[in-house]
C-alpha cells in the first residue's frame, strides 16, 4: 500500500472534526445563538441519513465509505420543530450572558464572579433579581454592605430575562468561527436599519 495514501487516510479524519454544522430549528432559526447550536459533522451526517434533518449547505470536503461519498453538511434544518424553552435557567453562564460578560459596577470585562446586591448576610436571596456579575475587585470592595453604604451603583437593575432577551444577548457574542454558509441563517430575523 502506498505510504502517502496511508498518511492522508490517517490525517484526514482529525482534519474533518473541524467542520461543524449549524443546526436550525424547523422555522429556520438557530436553536441557540450563544452558545451557537452546532453539531460535529458526524452527527449531521447521521441525522441526515436518519431523515431527521434537511441539508441546506455543504462544505467542499467529502467523507467516503466503501460505497458512498457524501459532502460534509455545513447547515442543517430539523424536520420537527423543537419548542423553545419558556423559562431561562438560573445559571452562572446565563447570568453572565444577561449582564453582557461585564461587571455591573465598573463595567470591567474578565475575572468575573457574581455578587448579591442585597448581601446574603442581610437577608438577600440568590435569584435573578438580586445577583449580578461583578469583577473580583468590585465584589471585594462592596463586601457585605448594601449599595447605599458601599457608595456603588449598578449599571442596570437585575431581573429575570426572557428567553428572547437572552437569545438577543447571545447574538452580540458570535463564536470565534463563523462559516460563510451560516451567515444567511444567523441574523435573518434581526430588524433592519432604515
Image (cartoon, rainbow, N blue to C red):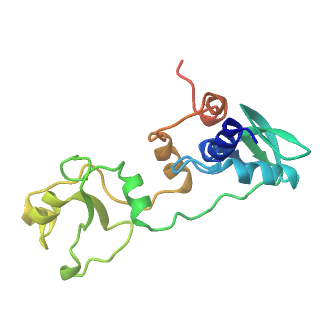
Picture quadrant of residue 153: bottom left
Quadrant for the C terminus, please. Answer: top right
Vertical relation: 69 (above or below) 44: above
Nearer to us in this view, 34 or 104:
34
Q: Residue furthest top?
A: 194
Nearer to us in this view, 173 or 71:
71
Q: Residue furthest right?
A: 67
Picture quadrant of residue 30: top right
Is residue 27 visible from the viewing direction of this image?
no
Q: Residue 32 location, x and y as percent?
A: 59, 50
Q: Measuring 70% from the left and 45% from the top, which residue is drawn there? A: 24
- Judged left or right of residue 160, residue 186 is right
Q: Residue 11 location, x and y as percent?
A: 62, 43
- Judged left or right of residue 94, residue 140 is left
Picture quadrant of residue 57: top right
Q: Measuring 43% from the left and 67% from the top, which residue is drawn there? A: 91
Quadrant for the N terminus, please. Answer: top right
Q: Measuring 67% from the left and 36% from the top, which residue is drawn there? A: 4
Nearer to us in this view, 191 or 26:
26
Vertical relation: 180 (above or below) 84: above
Amino acid at each position: 500500500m502506498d505510504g502517502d495514501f496511508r498518511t492522508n487516510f490517517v490525517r484526514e479524519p482529525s482534519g474533518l472534526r473541524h467542520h461543524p454544522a449549524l443546526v436550525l430549528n424547523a422555522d429556520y432559526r438557530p436553536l441557540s445563538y450563544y452558545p451557537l447550536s452546532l453539531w460535529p459533522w458526524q452527527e449531521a451526517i447521521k441525522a441526515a441519513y436518519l431523515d431527521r434533518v434537511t441539508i441546506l449547505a455543504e462544505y467542499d470536503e467529502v467523507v467516503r465509505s466503501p460505497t458512498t461519498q457524501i459532502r460534509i453538511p455545513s447547515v442543517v434544518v430539523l424536520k420537527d420543530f423543537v419548542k423553545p424553552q419558556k423559562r431561562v435557567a438560573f445559571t452562572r453562564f446565563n447570568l453572565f450572558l444577561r449582564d453582557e460578560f461585564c461587571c455591573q459596577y465598573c463595567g470591567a470585562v474578565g475575572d468575573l464572579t457574581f455578587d448579591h446586591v442585597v448581601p446574603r448576610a442581610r437577608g438577600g436571596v440568590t435569584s435573578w433579581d438580586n445577583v449580578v456579575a461583578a469583577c473580583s475587585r468590585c465584589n471585594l470592595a462592596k463586601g457585605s454592605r448594601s449599595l447605599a453604604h458601599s457608595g456603588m451603583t449598578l449599571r442596570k437593575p437585575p431581573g429575570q430575562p426572557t428567553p428572547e432577551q437572552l437569545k438577543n444577548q447571545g447574538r452580540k457574542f458570535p463564536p470565534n468561527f463563523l462559516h460563510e454558509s451560516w451567515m444567511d441563517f444567523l441574523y435573518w430575523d434581526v430588524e433592519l436599519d432604515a
